[in-house]
Image (cartoon, rainbow, N blue to C red):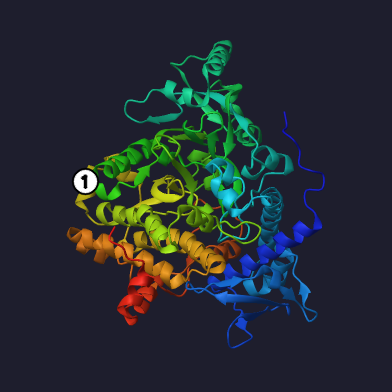
Amino acid sequence: MLGPMPDRRPVDAATWAEINRAAVAKAICELAYEEALSPAPLDAAQTRWELRLASGAVYRFHAVRRIWGQLAIRPESLVCGQRNLPVDDAVGFFLDARETLDISPATFCTYARELYNTLLADAHIVAVRAPYTADALAALPDTALQRLLDGHPKAPANKGRLGWGLADHAEHAPEFGGAFRLFWLAAARDRATLSLEPGLVEETLLKAALDENEQTRLKEACEVAGVSPASHLLLPVHPWQWQAQIAAHYAGEVAAGRLVPLGVFGDPFVAQQSLRTLANTRRPESLHIKLPLTILNTSAWRGVPGKYMKIGPAFSGWLAEMANRDPALRPLKVLREVAGAFYPHPHYERVPDAPYQFCEMLGAIWRESPEQGLSPGHRPMMMGALAQRDARGRPIASALIARSGLSHADWLERLFDAVAVPLYHFMCRYGVGFIAHGQNVTVILDGSIPAGVAIKDFQGDADLVDQDFAELASLPPAVLQVLKRRPPAHLLQHLQTGHFASVLRFLSEALADHDGFDETRFYATLAARLRHHQSRHPELADRFALFDLFQPKIPRIAINKVRLAIGYGDANQRPVPALGTQLDNPLHLAEMVLAAAGPERRHAMSGASAR
């Protein structure tokens, strides 16, 4: 049964203009950051800018250049053409920029589909979020807050969701907040793969999603279908994935009785920002379930690769063990993937280099909830939420800082000690590099003060150093065989781009814009906490030199430019970001400013403390 349909007129004119301006501002900012567009200043102070495109279109706006080199554009200042008309058409902007960006007709039209879907979703978010101040947003539970967030800050089309229509969004998208129950299949054990954490039994997985009555109903459905626990395992499926993909693509398996449809059972779940990860609304501390969705969203098809299902529990268990025994990782909690299941397609799996979306359709990951085992007064918040602003432009981080009673520098010290320092230590000590973006890093708040971090998503978002670190010797051989081995510079880039440039870049800009907190102080504080960590671990001096965060230049990574260049043809791997010219490293810039300052000014800017 379909859930409530969105309004027949899903967006009004004023909201449509607002979200389109914001999308154009983001597009110009990020494509200029990626060196695909070249705006020019119109005044000596570099506050008024002009973008001339090969089509003849001209866009003008007010902006300031930030420490990472990007332009912080005021969306309301955007005008175009000789008559300085207000900008209210994001797809029209990409049409104007198509020649400059060298976008093929086919790519333009498909990207426009992604952008239109994003704009419709953003219209709903803006309307629902309008009554909330930053202070009210900061007080929301994590799952409730996630439905009010803007999404990936680097991608203009960050809610593309190709394959979904209005009804699908209303039922399954996080911004609508709709809860839904899972569809269940019985899957033949001789065809499926199931990996469990040591000591875990399958019954625990069922209890995480179904109360006693629903477990009884599901077991009765198995009996009616003639399914035995000895021959079949019980596998949850996203209800959209079942009706849109599995029912047809796996029809032969259903006909043969290797897959047995059982129906909808269990507790209601709600989608997190990543769409595939679902949280139990009745029992927030219960295991999250990550399920494949064969839709294209933010440049990739959102399936689950089978090779990671086999090693998920072993790898996350090893990560958790390292974190538990290392005092330097006390703030860090690994959200263990306690189980992984995968059912390969009988034909697509046998095609060498088949497009990856056809090989990642049916599986599940059971993962610990960030709500589990929290100390009294502690609560989780997705890190990407910190830079989210309310209708008046105030970021959630600003509200948390005010509520904490700490200064900006002191609060940021707590944040960096809780997140950036443990990620850096994990890389240097154990040779594990996490792509720690805003959705897979969760800040643990003690009231309003950062006190820890929970990390997740280790399938493709974590790599191992390609050197013989003694600390990796205890990693299970199966994990070593599957995970990619990367040079130190590659792992370093995971932290610099995945976390610093993709999360902290937007947080420092938000605090500078609204609170006037200087970005040099922001990164001087980060540098001071990292240097403090180095001073406490002289035994890792060689590793700190290997993973040097303080070089003058760091890589510039482009994601939007790649999407527009490669188009939407099927491939056997996810798109790989491109490199641009190197960036000035904000950590290096901040330390240079500190070195030139006097002792008192140096101490004030660094936010250094004895902690």
Q: Quadrant of residue 13?
A: bottom right
Q: Residue at x 70, y 55 (%)?
A: 119
Left or right for 548, reference 32: left
Question: In the rendering, at what x and y percent does residue 375 appear?
Answer: 39, 37
Residue 76 seen: yes
- Against 148, is 280 above or below? above
Which quadrant of the figure has residue 603? Answer: bottom left
Q: Quadrant of the C terminus?
A: bottom left
Q: Above or below — where is 5 with respect to 355?
A: above
Q: Nearer the viewer, residue 500 or 316?
A: 500
For badge 1, the amino acid type reads Ala
Neighbor class of circle 1 (other Cα within 10 Å; few <14, some 14-19, many 20+) is few
Above or below, 167 relative to 46: above
* Percent of width and height locating residue 86: 77, 71
x, y percent for residue 604: 37, 71
In the rendered image, the residue lying farthest to the front is: 405
Report the label total: 1
Q: Quadrant of the N terminus?
A: top right
Mark 1 secondary-structure assignment: helix
Q: Is 427 or 593 nearer to us in this picture? A: 593
The part of the image, by quadrant, that contains residue 87 is bottom right
The residue that appears at 63% across and 52% down in the rendered structure is 159
Looking at this view, name the residue that lies furthest to the left. 539
As drawn, which residue projects farthest toward the bottom? 44
Viewer-proximal residue among 443 and 446: 446
- Residue labelled with disc 1: 473
Q: Is residue 577 visible?
A: no
The residue depicted at 55 percent of the width and 28 percent of the height is: 282
The answer to which of 53 and 445 lies nearer the viewer is 445
Residue 461: % across, % down: 42, 50
